[in-house]
Amino acid sequence: MKKLVIALGLIGVSAAAFAQKSSTDSIAEYRQMLQDGNPAELFEAKGEDLWKQKRGPKKASLEKCDLGKGAGVVKGAWVELPRYFSDTGRVQDLESRLVTCMQELQGFNGDEIAKTLFGRDEQSNVTALATWIAGESKGMKFNLSQSHVEERKMYEVGQRLFFMRGGSHDFACATCHSQDDKRIRLQDLPNLTKNPGAGNGFGAWPAYRVSNGQMWGAQLRLNDCYRQQRFPYPLFGSDATIALGVYMGVNGKGGEATAPAIKR
Amino acid sequence: MNRTYTLGLSVVAAALLAACSTPMPTSAELDKLTQDIIGRSFRAQGQAKLDRLNPDEDNRLCAEADRTGVPLDAKVTEAIEARNMKTIKAPADGKYLGDFKEGEKIAQSGAGKTWTDAEGSINGGNCYNCHQISKEELSYGTLGPSLYNYGKLRGVANPNSAESKPIVEYTWGKIQNARAYNACSNMPRFAHKGILTEAQIKHVMALLLDPASPVNK
């Protein structure tokens, strides 16, 4: 912890110096300084605990949750998500799948969780669970399935959403994320239409955000992109957010999973 | 037990068969599916109402070209530019330039129009997010071209002179509605979409064109 405080102090001191470099270099430096001290670890520990704890109206753990590789298999699950699940008849990402398991196994009300604000109550638990589960695939390569027709349809929809211009400013995801080596202010923008950008960008969330001290899952990351695009509010676990996950994840095939990452 | 097992297997087999034999929908059907998904995936929040998802023909055409990599037909491009050109209005009092110091503030601000911005609050121009503008501001984006020395490079010694008129009017139009000049520009249509007021656009004009502005130093 002391190391972390010192590291954060250093970030403040050298902020001006950072302005002279690319933000990727600066963030690589953050990571170096925060080595062994990424606060995401606290969320990973909480997530692992939540997975094993008997909770909810049914007083059950999530250890029988099927994340796509069979009941209870966590390692390697995240690099294959979103995928089609025959029990729900839907393509689901990690967070929406967790809500399904919390409902089916533990008896929570999934709709209520989906409506809960990010960072509150069971939503903060979903984030912690996602952080731990993603971390269990750290270093593995993305390998999303496109074998089911629903998965292929979601890729196509995701691509259409990615390029859709709308809102008051006519922004699309593609406005900022379809070219190489561009930035907003000093923030480097990953090109999410192909690797390495797609794997790097998609593969980093959940991530701990230094700027606001919050742990953000992929759903919140997308939600805030849409906020800045001046679109209306995307519903948690909605098909639009999942289709975008499929689009980015498939584009990132072969890219390395780095979540939980540490971000600006 | 045995029967249930067999039944289970045949359900799995049927599902597999269905999955493999279901053909991919056509591109038009996928467009329709996308619209259906958009329709059920968003809700209004604050000032970001659902009408922001309404189809806009200019945006639909440009998005399709971006997605497929097939450029728009020249006639379509001309039509988009022509209808956006019609939205451009000269300043009511004939004055194109305001105060460059105010312009700098507007260029710096990325506020406005999100669901977390109060409705009716003052919007910024987001200019530095994408453009280099003054030399002093190092934190600028690169999605748009550098605007440093914008007026100077274009020989604007006196923005009120007759020889500066074409570039002054072009710049005014470009900020009001960039897609009058470039059908699928990524730049927001600041006047057409009610992002910046006429007075704010005058200040941004001064930032770019006033010889006294730091941009032209």
Image (cartoon, coloured by chain):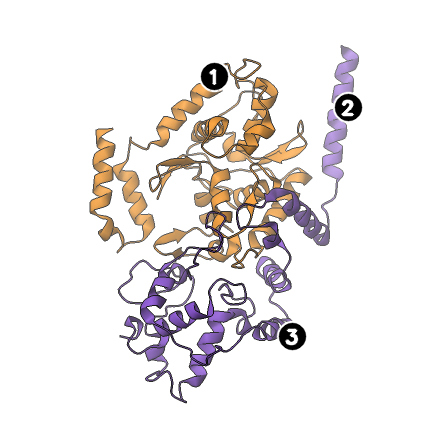
Residue flagged by tag 2: what amino acid is it? Ser
Most distant residue in the top direction = B1
Relative to residue A92, is residue A118 drawn left or right?
left
Give the residue drawn at x 38%, y 85%: B160
Q: Secondary structure at mark 2?
A: helix
Give the residue drawn at x 39%, y 56%: A183
Q: Which chain is orange?
A: A
Q: Which quarter of the figure is the C terminus of chain B placed in?
A: bottom left
Q: Position of residue B139 (x, y in %)?
A: 31, 58
- The image's mark for residue A52 is 1
Give the camera-side residue of A10 and B71. A10
Q: Position of residue A75 (x, y in %)?
A: 48, 26
- Label 2: chain? B
Residue A27: name its quadrant. Answer: top left
- The image's mark for residue B75 is 3
Q: Colour of chain B?
A: purple
Q: Are the residues tagged 2 and 1 within 8 Å (C-beta)?
A: no
Q: Which quarter of the figure is the N terminus of chain B placed in?
A: top right
- The image's mark for residue B10 is 2
